[in-house]
Image (cartoon, helix red, strand yellow):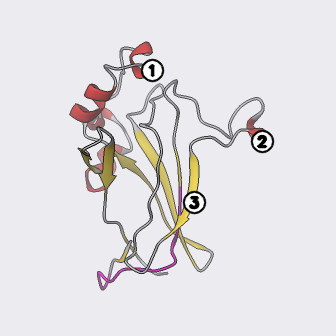
Amino acid sequence: MVDASTCKPIKGAVVDIWHADASGVYSGFGAGAGSRTFLRGVQKTDSRGVATFRTVYPGWYQGRTVHIHVKVYLGGNVVHTGQLYFPDRMTDSVYRKAPYSRRPNREIRNAADFVYRNGGKSSLLSVRKNSSGKYVGKITMGVQRS
């Protein structure tokens, strides 16, 4: 996390993320929502402006491309609300394997997503596989302090 005006790291920003599971289901919605809190997390940025999350690859739901919701707070105030996206080729690769392959025919790719079309390219994660075969996604987010 960096200050959009100065590009200096922001320490202590609160980063909140949430996304759907492989079946396209969110916690916190629908019947029993209050007791379901899976695939949600909050972290504070360190002195380098870094917040780290460990999660699973997001699922999709009808009408949307694969994404992670993100909110950033500074001093208790929301300074950014957005979504993070994955390269379509990466998602295609992941979705050929279970449990994602149980839901074939993902209908919306990034370019066709109504939110992605409005600036999503700047929220595209840089993703690579590490030596243990796990995916690591990175992005530098610039936010206005107020």
Decide: few, some or many residues near mark 3? Use Cα within 10 Å; few <14, some 14-19, many ≥20.
some
Under circle 1, the secondary element is loop
The N terminus: image quadrant: bottom left
Question: At label 1, which amino acid type do we have?
Answer: Pro
Is the residue 114 above or below the residue 118 in the image?
A: above
Residue labelled with disc 3: 42
N-terminal of the pair, mark 2 or mark 3, is 2
On screen, residue 64 versus residue 134, left or right, reads right
**Residue 130 colored magenta?**
no
Give how far apart the Cα atoms at labels 1 and 3 are.
Answer: 25 Å
Image location of residue 91, percent across then percent down: 30, 32
2 vs 1, front mark: 1
User: In front here: 128 or 66?
Assistant: 128
Residue labelled with disc 1: 99
Image location of residue 16, percent across then percent down: 55, 59
| Residue sitting at the far front | 132
Question: At label 2, which amino acid type do we have?
Answer: Gly
Under circle 2, the secondary element is helix
Residue labelled with disc 2: 34
Name the main secondary structure of what is drawn in magenta. Answer: loop
**Residue 11 colored magenta?**
yes
User: In front here: 118 or 15?
Assistant: 15
Can residue 119 be seen here? The reply is: no
Q: Which residues are magenta?
A: 5-16
Is the residue 50 above or below the residue 53 in the image?
A: below
2 vs 3, front mark: 3
Q: Residue at x 44, y 36 (%)?
A: 58
N-terminal of the pair, mark 2 or mark 1, is 2
N-terminal of the pair, mark 1 or mark 3, is 3
User: In front here: 140 or 5?
Assistant: 140
Decide: few, some or many residues near mark 2? Use Cα within 10 Å; few <14, some 14-19, many ≥20.
few
